Amino acid sequence: MITPDLDQLRASMEPAKAAEARFWDRMAELRIPDGEAWEALRVALAEIQDGAHHTDPWTVAVERLAADRQRPSDREPMQ
């Protein structure tokens, strides 16, 4: 039999699962390789462990990678 505590734990994981799904959907839209996505996530998690004020590494990583994709590359000639 499932205990109420286990049910509560499962319910509390739903927002995290949804955030992860949105993260990977956005990575696919932006055509960001898995390795780059994981690295951005690791950086956000390390910041949280070091006391950063943000608490959602999925959203932080998506926002940063999306912003990086919008900036012109240093390698692209300016027009």
Image: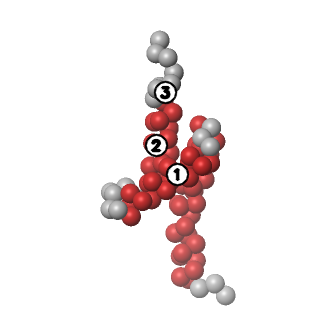
Mark-to-mark CA distance, 3 and 2:
17 Å
Query: Circle 2 sits on which residue?
Result: 63
Q: Amino acid at mark 2?
A: Glu
Mark-to-mark CA distance, 1 and 3:
19 Å
Q: Earlier in the sequence, mark 1 or mark 3?
A: 1
- Tell which residue pokes out farthest to the top in this image: 79
Judge by depth and name the residue closer to the eye, 76 or 61: 76
Residue 53 point in image, percent of width and height: 32, 57
Residue 23 in view (yes/no): no
Residue 19 point in image, percent of width and height: 54, 55
- Secondary structure under tag 2 reads helix
What residue sits 38% from the left and 57% below the top? 47
- Secondary structure under tag 3 reads loop
Q: How would you rate the neighbour count of disc 1 (Cα within 10 Å): few for under 14, some for 14-19, many for 20 or more?
A: few
Q: Amino acid at mark 3?
A: Ser
Q: Amino acid at mark 1?
A: Glu
Residue 71 point in image, percent of width and height: 46, 29
Q: How would you rate the neighbour count of disc 2 (Cα within 10 Å): few for under 14, some for 14-19, many for 20 or more?
A: some
What residue sits 35% from the left and 62% below the top? 50
- Secondary structure under tag 1 reads helix
Residue 67 in view (yes/no): yes
Mark-to-mark CA distance, 1 and 2:
14 Å
Q: Earlier in the sequence, mark 3 or mark 2?
A: 2
Disc 3 versus disc 2: nearer the observer:
3
Q: On screen, 75 above or below 62?
A: above
Q: On screen, 1 above or below 71?
A: below
Residue 6 point in image, percent of width and height: 57, 80
Query: Circle 1 sits on which residue?
Result: 39
Disc 1 versus disc 2: nearer the observer:
1
What residue sits 59% from the left and 37% below the top? 30
Query: Circle 3 sits on which residue?
Result: 73
